Image (spheres, rainbow, N blue to C red):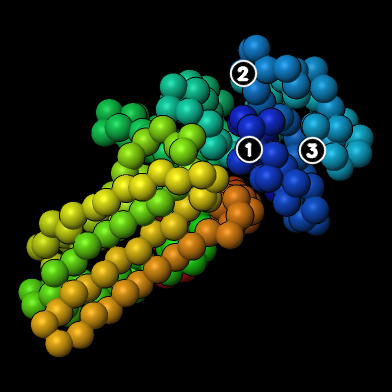
Amino acid sequence: MVRIGIAGACGKMGRRIAVLAAADPEIKIISALEKEDSPEKGKDLGDVIGAGKMDVPVMTGTDEALRDTECLVDFTLPGSTLEHVAVCREKKVPMVIGTTGLGEEAEDVIGEASKEIPIVFSPNMAIGVNVLFNIVSEAARVLGRDFSIKVDETHHVHKKDSPSGTAKMIAKIIREASGVDAPVKAFREGEVIGNHGIVFDGEYENLEIRHDAKSRDVFAAGAIKAAKFVVGKKPGLYNMTDVLGLR
């Protein structure tokens, strides 16, 4: 059984991770971490997510939250994530990071920390999206010279970063596979969880590859899979390709 802590446990993603983790016989939630001014502070996580008493209080102290924790799952904000990375590095606690909007400097900090602890870091934990990455790489390698390539992404209006980390990753994969810089169009509509599309437009045919997330549970499920993977691994920076064995 893997003992995990959840950072941002009372946020939209944190709650879904907690719900799926609570139902997984291979996972035990040890701690729930929230910001200092959270209205859920001091409450039992089970009451917060509607799962009944779990004896896991929502706390704000990172040191305390990491006690007996084998992996911290973090889907918070860039500043909070970096704070958690520093403490996990010190305490030698593996991490799963799904936070988006991290810049190059923040990614460098995560990379440095991964020299001392194992970290799974991915802009998108959805299993289908990571299969899509492989498909896009192969399509770009074969079609890149003769087809124009465009990327589009749509998310909810509350999303802070634009384009999404996933769209940037897709563009990077296309560039590495074909040498083509694909333009990315970002849309913000309603409560869309996350839709991504890639269109290869040729003179005689079009190829379109899409992934649409139906609920946040797709990311939560991937994060839990990543937590099971990272515990016991050697220090290093891993992604969902490693978790899913797609290399």
**Mark 2 closeness class: few <14, some 14–19, many ≥20 residues within 10 Å:** some
> Does residue 34 appear left or right of residue 226 in this picture?
right
Q: How many marks?
A: 3
Mark 2 or mark 3: which comes first in sequence? 2
Q: CA distance from mark 2 to mark 1?
A: 14 Å
Residue placed under numbered mark 1 in the picture: 12
- Residue 218, given in percent of the width and then of the height, sits at 59, 57
> Does residue 155 appear left or right of residue 111 in this picture?
right
Mark 2 or mark 1: which comes first in sequence? 1
State the SS at label 2.
loop
Q: Amino acid at mark 1?
A: Lys
Q: Quadrant of residue 55?
A: top right
Q: Residue at x 49, y 66 (%)?
A: 128
Residue 171: image tag:
none
State the SS at label 1.
helix
**Mark 1 closeness class: few <14, some 14–19, many ≥20 residues within 10 Å:** few
- Residue 120, given in percent of the width and then of the height, sits at 47, 47
Name of the residue lying farthest toward the front: 190
Q: CA distance from mark 2 to mark 3?
A: 17 Å
Q: Amino acid at mark 2?
A: Lys
Q: CA distance from mark 1 to mark 3?
A: 10 Å
- Residue 130, given in percent of the width and then of the height, sits at 43, 63
State the SS at label 3.
helix
Q: Quadrant of residue 46?
A: top right
Residue placed under numbered mark 3 in the picture: 49
- Residue 129, given in percent of the width and then of the height, sits at 44, 62
- Residue 169 visible at all: no
Residue placed under numbered mark 2 in the picture: 35
